[in-house]
């Protein structure tokens, strides 16, 4: 029968948007249309993303239903507070699609028992670990409208953050300006310049187990940033740049640093330059890639370099590379932790 077959073909069901009416149907086990029948016939996890007017969300009937639904083992994603389709503002807005995807991935990664309402992440590879990640470019102001920056999209850093969450870690993401939605489960701090990134990293450092510096930090910043827009003239313009602090090297040089991981994007002599960088910054692990293959792309390849040598990860989507990197980090981290 179609409604039984359909519900058997999937790993999970997500109802998004889930109206107040549909939630009430679920609570009472109705099966008078295809969706409610699929939900009742399922033997997989059911996720529900409520979306309704703030007053409908607050009603005692809805709140009773929500409690009952959770007691029945259904997992709720959201809602959040914000602008609503009806023009009002408040609780009841559906999570954004990217946030829902992140919730599903996190839920399925940690689902040791698919039938359980709140899957435990206790067995995940990085469960209980606190990871601080930098991502994206930094932008160094020349004047209020002009800046020096680079073409980093943030995709690799955000993939590492996403993968770390999927593996059970508590993630803090310090991000330069990018066009990406951060993983919903990460604590995200947005910064612009390298000095701001260093400040944010240092403030978040206490208690972190692992620091992964993926950001493409600008090596230099203008010595002077004008308060007013610079006027053009026919003369050539000389801008004096001064070096930015090396955030990764600063963290690695602290007493009792977290396990530090760097990235190296090179255009040539990949392994040699990356290894030199690893030694210069005194870090146990560096992930090297060819700059032109990596910048802004959805896929790339990585070579991991540590004391034992180089370990290539095959070309693939950045989220898969991020998982490969984190598995390597987890093994090294456990080893160094045991030696302490
Ligand atoms: O020296 P280079 O910029 O090539 O090193 C790259 C690695 O160092 C990356 O992990 C990057 O995030 C980090 N880095 C940093 N602060 C800088 C420059 C680089 O954290 N100012």
Image (cartoon, rainbow, N blue to C red):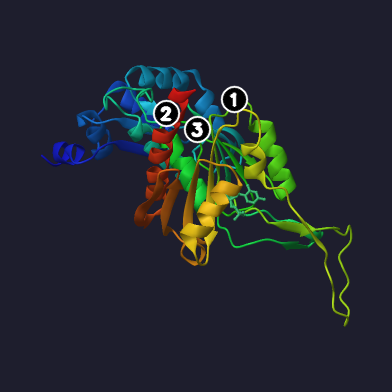
Q: Which mark is residue 227?
A: none
The residue that disc 2 covers is: 334
The residue that disc 1 covers is: 207
Residue at 72% x, 39% y is 199
Q: Which mark is residue 79?
A: 3
Secondary structure of the residue carrying numbered label 1: loop
Q: Position of residue 187 (x, y in %)?
A: 58, 34
Alpha carbon distance from label 3 to label 1 = 31 Å
Q: Position of residue 16 (x, y in %)?
A: 39, 40
Q: Position of residue 202 (x, y in %)?
A: 68, 35
Secondary structure of the residue carrying numbered label 3: loop
Question: Is 37 left or right of 278, judged from the image as shown?
Answer: left
Alpha carbon distance from label 2 to label 3 = 37 Å
Res. 128 in view:
no
Is 287 in front, or is 180? 287
Question: Is 18 left or right of 84, judged from the image as shown?
Answer: left
Label 2: few (<14), some (14–19) or many (≥20) C-alpha neighbours in 10 Å? few
Res. 27 in view:
yes
Q: Position of residue 51 (x, y in %)?
A: 47, 36
Asked if residue 321 is positioned above or below residue 334 in the image, the reply reads below
Q: Earlier in the sequence, mark 2 or mark 3?
A: 3
Question: Is 196 left or right of 6, judged from the image as shown?
Answer: right
Tell me the mark number nearer the camera, choosing from 2 and 3.
2
Tell me the mark number nearer the camera, choosing from 2 and 1.
2
Q: Name the quadrant containing residue 146.
A: bottom right
Alpha carbon distance from label 2 to label 1 = 17 Å
Secondary structure of the residue carrying numbered label 2: helix
Q: Name the quadrant containing residue 107.
A: top left
Asked if residue 249 is positioned above or below residue 232 in the image, the reply reads above
Residue at 20% x, 37% y is 7
Is 248 in front, or is 237? 248
């Amino acid at each position: 029968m179609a409604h039984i077959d359909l519900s058997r073909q999937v790993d999970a069901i997500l109802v998004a948007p889930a109206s107040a009416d549909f939630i009430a149907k679920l609570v009472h086990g109705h099966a008078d249309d295809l969706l409610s029948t699929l939900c009742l016939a399922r033997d997989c996890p059911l996720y529900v993303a409520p979306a309704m007017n703030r007053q409908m969300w607050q009603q005692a009937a809805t709140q009773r239903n929500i409690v009952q639904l959770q007691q029945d083992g259904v997992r709720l994603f959201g809602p959040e507070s914000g602008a609503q389709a009806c023009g009002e503002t408040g609780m009841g807005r559906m999570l954004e699609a990217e946030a829902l995807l992140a919730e599903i991935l996190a839920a399925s990664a940690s689902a040791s028992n698919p039938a359980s309402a709140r899957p435990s992440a206790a067995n995940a590879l990085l469960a209980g670990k606190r990871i601080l990640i930098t991502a994206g470019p930094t932008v160094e102001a020349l004047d209020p409208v002009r800046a020096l920056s680079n073409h980093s999209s943030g995709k690799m850093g955000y993939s590492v953050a996403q993968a770390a969450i999927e593996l059970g870690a508590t993630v803090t993401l310090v991000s330069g300006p990018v066009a990406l939605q951060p993983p919903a489960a990460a604590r995200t701090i947005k910064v612009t310049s390298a000095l701001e990134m260093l400040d944010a990293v240092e403030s978040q450092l206490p208690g972190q187990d692992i620091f992964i510096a993926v950001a493409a930090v600008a090596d230099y910043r203008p010595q002077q940033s004008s308060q007013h827009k610079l006027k053009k003239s026919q003369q050539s313009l000389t801008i004096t740049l001064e070096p930015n602090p090396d955030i990764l090297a600063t963290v690695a040089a602290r007493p009792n640093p977290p396990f530090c991981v760097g990235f190296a994007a090179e255009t040539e002599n990949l392994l040699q330059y990356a290894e030199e960088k690893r030694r210069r910054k005194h870090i146990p692990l560096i992930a090297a890639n060819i700059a032109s293959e990596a910048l802004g792309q959805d896929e790339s390849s990585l070579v991991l370099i540590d004391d034992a040598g180089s370990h290539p990860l095959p070309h693939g989507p950045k989220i898969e590379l991020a998982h490969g990197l984190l598995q390597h980090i987890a093994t090294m981290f456990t080893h160094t932790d045991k030696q302490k």
